[in-house]
Image (spheres, helix red, strand yellow):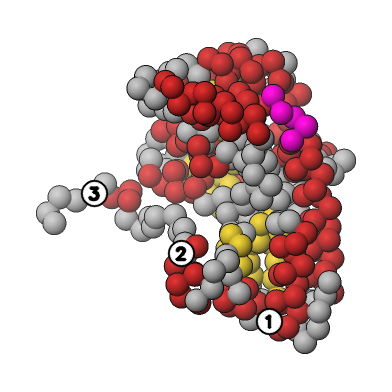
């Protein structure tokens, strides 16, 4: 092939998706697979969503609403924030791409944690920018060091809170100090895809800060607790000037109409959201405690997953028993993995499987 791609793409690898359910079934000769590798909502989605999608199928021949008017209106009502501050997207990841497209020029810098959502770095590199990564401190963002890493070349700084893949949060007072200290000409991207799962009193809801900091961009999604991962719809809340720049570079009709209808319905069912969050908290405490009994440590999570680590060959044992997790690396540990929190029955089965490896049953 004589046609060369842009130099910025050298060294970039596609996002690793792992084995499929069908591949696992065939490889190990099993019929049941528990997919706990992608942080999906194991409790599904609201019944209101299914009804909305069925009704919307009558309009499949039409282009979607390019302004996502109903979703924006519903979000505006839900948060009591003016519509001009919202941008709805094809998953919140699209806004990451729009931000780097709109604000990162060649050799511009973006600061982020060393262990966080990898698409921050990828999108910065694609635009010819430099990703400045800062080591974490006990699985958390080191906000002091991130602040020190900001230079006159910095355009964006990313904070994932709760963080993916560690599940940790940064303390409220630390984050407030950080946001107040970042120069006003640097955009602060708060990725809060898992914020509905956070129940710590030390978690900062950044919505209240929007009026005070024009450089604050908050990302949220319908993919996680709302259970709309397959429809790809997320949103950002930001100053109207930032939203205006992103609208210039976004695709026309970027969010399909089924996703828009589903998102509106999902927002109407806050009872479902609260129930999912409550069940998640119970199972998070249960699984992390039982793992600890088996000498499988994990970072303190405020999300719907655990980042676990041990020196036992846990991952292979889980996989051959039809439990899909996301393998990670952590210095000093033979095995590290991110596991989505499942139902109580899922966890009892997991502990049974892992307990065999540790010569005990931890249920």
N-terminal-most mark, 2 or 1: 2
Residue occupying the point 74% across, 36% down:
273
Residue wearing tag 2: 22
Residue wearing tag 1: 312
Q: Which one is closest to the eye, mark 3 or mark 2?
A: 2
Q: Residue 10: x percent and y percent?
A: 32, 55
Query: Crowdedness of circle 2 by 10 Å Cα count: few (<14), some, many (20+)?
Result: few
Viewer-proximal residue, 270 or 206? 270
Query: Crowdedness of circle 3 by 10 Å Cα count: few (<14), some, many (20+)?
Result: few
Residue occupying the point 54% across, 73% down:
30
Q: Residue 326: x percent and y percent?
A: 58, 63
Asked if the residues shown at circle 2 and circle 1 are in contact, with their CB atoms under 8 angstroms apart, the answer is: no
> Is the residue 360 above or below the residue 59 in the image?
below
Inspect the magenta stretch and tell me whether residue 269 lies in it: yes
Which of the image's four quarters has the C terminus? Answer: bottom right
Which of the image's four quarters has the N terminus? Answer: bottom left
Residue 247 visible in the displayed image: yes
Asked if the residues shown at circle 3 and circle 2 are in contact, with their CB atoms under 8 angstroms apart, the answer is: no
Q: Residue 100: x percent and y percent?
A: 45, 36
Q: Main secondary structure of the magenta part?
A: helix
In terms of secondary structure, where does tag 2 sit?
Answer: helix
Q: Residue 352: x percent and y percent?
A: 75, 75
Which segment did they paint magenta? 268-272
In terms of secondary structure, where does tag 1 sit?
Answer: loop
Query: Crowdedness of circle 1 by 10 Å Cα count: few (<14), some, many (20+)?
Result: some
N-terminal-most mark, 3 or 2: 3
N-terminal-most mark, 3 or 1: 3
Kindly identify which numbered label has been placed on residue 195.
Answer: none
Viewer-proximal residue, 20 or 183? 20
Kindly identify which numbered label has been placed on residue 5.
Answer: 3
Inspect the magenta stretch and tell me whether residue 256 lies in it: no
């Amino acid at each position: 092939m004589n046609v060369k791609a842009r130099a910025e793409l050298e060294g970039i690898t596609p996002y690793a998706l792992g084995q499929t359910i069908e591949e696992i079934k065939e490889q190990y000769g099993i019929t049941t697979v528990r997919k706990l590798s992608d942080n999906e909502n194991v409790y599904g989605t609201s019944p209101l969503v299914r009804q909305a999608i069925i009704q919307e199928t009558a309009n499949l021949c039409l282009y979607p609403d390019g302004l996502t008017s109903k979703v924006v209106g519903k979000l505006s009502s839900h948060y009591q924030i003016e519509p001009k501050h919202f941008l709805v997207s094809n998953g919140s990841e699209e806004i990451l791409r729009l931000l780097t497209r709109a604000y990162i020029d060649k050799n511009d810098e973006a600061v982020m944690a060393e262990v966080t959502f990898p698409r921050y770095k990828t999108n910065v590199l694609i635009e010819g920018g430099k990703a400045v990564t800062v080591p974490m401190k006990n699985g958390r963002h080191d906000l002091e060091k991130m602040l020190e890493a900001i230079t006159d070349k910095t355009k964006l700084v990313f904070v994932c809170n709760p963080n993916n893949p560690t599940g940790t949060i940064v303390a409220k007072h630390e984050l407030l100090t950080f946001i107040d200290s970042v120069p006003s000409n640097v955009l602060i991207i708060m990725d809060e895809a898992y914020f509905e799962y956070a129940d710590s009193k030390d978690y900062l809801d950044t919505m209240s800060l929007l009026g005070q900091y024009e450089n604050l961009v908050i990302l949220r999604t319908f993919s996680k607790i709302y259970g709309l991962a397959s429809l790809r719809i997320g949103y950002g809340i930001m100053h109207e000037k930032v939203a205006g720049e992103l609208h210039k570079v976004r695709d026309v009709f970027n969010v399909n109409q089924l996703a828009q209808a589903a998102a509106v319905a999902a927002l109407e069912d806050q009872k479902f959201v609260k129930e999912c969050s409550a069940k998640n908290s119970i199972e998070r405490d249960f699984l992390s405690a039982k793992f600890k009994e088996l000498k499988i440590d994990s970072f303190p999570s405020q999300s719907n997953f655990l980042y676990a680590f041990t020196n036992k060959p846990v991952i292979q044992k889980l996989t051959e028993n039809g439990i899909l997790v996301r393998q990670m690396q952590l210095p000093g540990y033979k095995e590290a993995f991110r596991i989505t929190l499942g139902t109580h029955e899922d966890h009892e089965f997991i502990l049974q499987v892992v307990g065999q490896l540790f010569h005990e049953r931890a249920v």
